Structure formats: structure tokens, C-alpha cells
Amino acid sequence: MKAAVLETYNNFVWKEVVTPKVKPGEVLIRIKFASICGSDMHIFPGDFHPRTPIPFTPGHEMGGVVEEIGEGVSGFEVGDKVAVDPIIWCGKCPACLRGHYPACTSLKLVGVDLDGGFAEYISVPQHMVFKTASHLPDEHVALVEIYGIGFHANNRAETKDGDSIAIWGAGRVGQVILQAARTKTKSTIFMVDPLDKRLEIAKNHYENVITINPTKENPVEAIKKYTDGKGVDIAFEAIGHAHEFDGVPTPIRACIQSIRGAGKVVVLGLGDDPAPIVFKELIWKEAKIVASRVSHGEFTEVIEHLNAGNLKPEALISKVMHGSQIQQAFELVQNESQNYLKVLLDFSS
Ligand SMILES: NC(=O)c1ccc[n+]([C@@H]2O[C@H](COP(=O)([O-])OP(=O)(O)OC[C@H]3O[C@@H](n4cnc5c(N)ncnc54)[C@H](O)[C@@H]3O)[C@@H](O)[C@H]2O)c1
Ligand SMILES: [Zn+2]
Ligand SMILES: [Zn+2]
């Protein structure tokens, strides 16, 4: 088969490699589309070294069809359309023993810690494979994993109908939090981002979305104004490395200032720098801060919503390129990140 091999950092080679053999308990999948994630953009230049075992094939957001079924596997047929949940937990650490798998101390991902889906085939254990409806476009199946992040964040927040929401960051993660939130609440959703193009994607696809550009107005003041001083029920931070703007509080502090008393803040951004907050502001509200990492059982929920047409995958897809053009695709996202949300790689032909 052909695969995109990261032979040295910053350098993909599209080459012939051995097609994986399906082992007992596994499903061999013919990949149709895989999607480039923000963490792939860190793997590419070597930020994850030595966790990433180069040479290797990244790709943890993928969809395809079942090509072959391993011994002992039930519930799948050749030709089924499927998405792959890339998470591998240890099952033995204190978090795993409590069933809290996203907090596994040795969490691994297919496509980060071992070969992944930027290839024509992958073979993975049956429990990582999730069937979708056959009518779904192959491109959309590759987005199940990233949607899982958005649904998990909302499940961590226990978002329910009537909840108003503010999302800091209208990038890939912020947009899937928005789409997942919209399946749960019809109330106002505020999107905060300095990039108008990204704010427009949110506004153009959903009713009752109010966009706030922090270079033009103070998001905390704007949210207070629109909610008659009350604040929102839930605020999400989905930025990571935040830009700073004069006179505007840092995003996590702004999230705390924007929620109502006893509201919730959910943090997802994986920045490396400390983010100053004033705990008094949290304590006065007796508010909760909750962290959200990857997903935990949300694949089924995502697929139900995709099958039913409740999500807007086209709003996320900026560009589709053939798998053989992976080097150009990564350079494009690296050099013009603000112009692209999801770039998909086509391995179907
Ligand atoms: N917790 C998880 O499960 C999980 C999963 C995937 C990614 N992440 C992390 O989430 C973060 C976001 O990922 P992404 O792929 O959406 O990145 P992205 O670059 O597509 O989006 C980040 C957005 O934040 C905006 N931004 C920057 N500074 C801002 C500010 N001060 N106020 C408001 N918006 C601001 C940027 O303009 C950009 O649109 C990253 O740190 C990523 O590593 C977390
Ligand atoms: Zn990812
Ligand atoms: Zn564990």
C-alpha cells in the first residue's frame, strides 16, 4: 500500500510500505479520508519528539470502509463505513481503574504513538471501530474524532437545553464545541476570536450566535451587555496559545468573569504558559472549572447526530488534497493556519 511516512521531521515521503495484516480481533480498514489535526502540526516539526517514533505514519482522525475482518470479530461486514477511535488507555492506572480513561497516565493514540491513518490501510482492534450510516459522505466520516472532542467538552459541562454559552477560540476545537452545543441548547452562543473569517463561519451556519472580536470590543463587557448583566451558564476555553490584547483579560480569566454565579468554565486549550486567574472571582461565584481531554465514549453520540444530519461538517472542511500531496498540505496549514480549519487528505484513489 501507499502511506505518508514522516521520515525526518518536516519531511513526509509518499511511498510503498507493507500493507498491515489483520490479526485476530482486528478489522482492516481501507482509509478513504483522514483529517489533519492541530497536534499533527506539532508532530510535523518534531515538537512531540521523542514521543513520536520517526520514521512513522501519523493520522488519528480517519474514516474508511471495512476491507477484511479478523478472526473472532463480530458485528462488522466488508464494505461497512467506519470511523476509528484512536485512543488506547492502559486499563491499570488509578484513573483507568476508576473508568476515567481520558486521564490515563500512559494514554496513547494511534497516529501519535504508533502508525496511524495517513495511509491506504490500517488494522485496529474491533473496539476502536465505529460503524456509520452508509449514506454519509466519506469526508464526513473522517471528522467523527474531532467532533468527539466537542461532544466530550459539552458532556463535561453537562450542557442542557436553555444553557447560554460562550466559546473562546473559533478554531477547529471551538467550532466543534459550538456544533455539539447546538445539538443540546437553542440558547445564545457567543464566539470569541480575533479572526473575523472564523467568526463568520460560526455565524453563517447557526442561528442565535453572537460573535465577538477581542481586538474590537472587550468580550466580558459584551457578554454582560447582551445577557443583561447576568453572564452565561457555561464558558469554554479552546485556544491554547492565546494572543494578548490591550485592556482585555486573558481568556481563562475572561471565561470566569463571563459566567453567571454557580456557572461552569471548561478548559481545553493546551498552552504551555501559566494562565493567571484570580481565584476570588471564581470563589465568589462558587463556580466550577472542569478540564476536558480527548473523548470518552462520544463516538456513538457523534455518529447518531451525523447520521441524522444534525451537524454541519461542510462548515469545518476548508480544503481536500490527495494523500500524495501531504507535504504541500502540511506546509500550507503551517504557513497559512488562519485560512484553514480542517484540511482533509484523500486516500480513496
Ligand atoms: N482538550 C482536548 O481534548 C483537545 C483536543 C484537541 C486540541 N486541543 C487544544 O485546543 C487548542 C485549540 O486547538 P485548535 O485546533 O482549535 O486551534 P486553532 O489554532 O484552530 O484555534 C485557536 C483559535 O484561538 C484564537 N485565539 C487566539 N488568541 C485568542 C484570544 N486571546 N481570544 C480569543 N481567541 C483567540 C485563534 O485566532 C484561533 O482561531 C489547542 O491548544 C489544542 O492543542 C485540545
Ligand atoms: Zn486530533
Ligand atoms: Zn491508564
Image (spheres, rainbow, N blue to C red):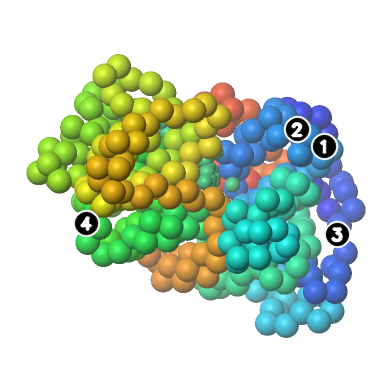
**Front position among marks 2 and 1:** 2
First in sequence, mark 2 or 3: give its number.
3
* Disc 3 crowd, CA 10 A, few/some/many (<14, 14-19, 20+): some
Measure the alpha-carbon separation of dots 3 and 1: 18 Å
* Residue 175, numbered circle: none
Q: Are marks 2 and 1 in contact (CB under 8 Å)?
A: yes
> Which residue is located at x 28 percent, y 30 percent?
213
Q: Is residue 205 visible?
A: no
* Disc 2 crowd, CA 10 A, few/some/many (<14, 14-19, 20+): few
Disc 3, SS: loop
| Horizontal and vertical percent position of residue 135 | 51, 71
| Horizontal and vertical percent position of residue 94 | 66, 59
Mark 1 lies on residue: 54
| Horizontal and vertical percent position of residue 66 | 71, 70
Disc 1, SS: loop
Looking at the rendered structure, the kind of residue marked 2 is His
Mark 4 lies on residue: 187
Measure the alpha-carbon separation of dots 2 and 1: 9 Å
| Horizontal and vertical percent position of residue 322 | 66, 44
First in sequence, mark 3 or 1: give its number.
3
Query: Relative to 44, does residue 60 appear above or below in the rendering?
Result: below
* Residue 49, numbered circle: 2
Q: Residue furthest left?
A: 228
> Which residue is located at x 18 percent, y 34 percent?
222
* Disc 1 crowd, CA 10 A, few/some/many (<14, 14-19, 20+): some
Q: Is mark 4 within 8 Å of ligand 1?
A: no
Q: Are marks 3 and 1 in contact (CB under 8 Å)?
A: no
* Disc 4 crowd, CA 10 A, few/some/many (<14, 14-19, 20+): some
Measure the alpha-carbon separation of dots 2 and 3: 25 Å
First in sequence, mark 4 or 2: give its number.
2
> Which residue is located at x 59 percent, y 27 percent?
334
Mark 3 lies on residue: 20
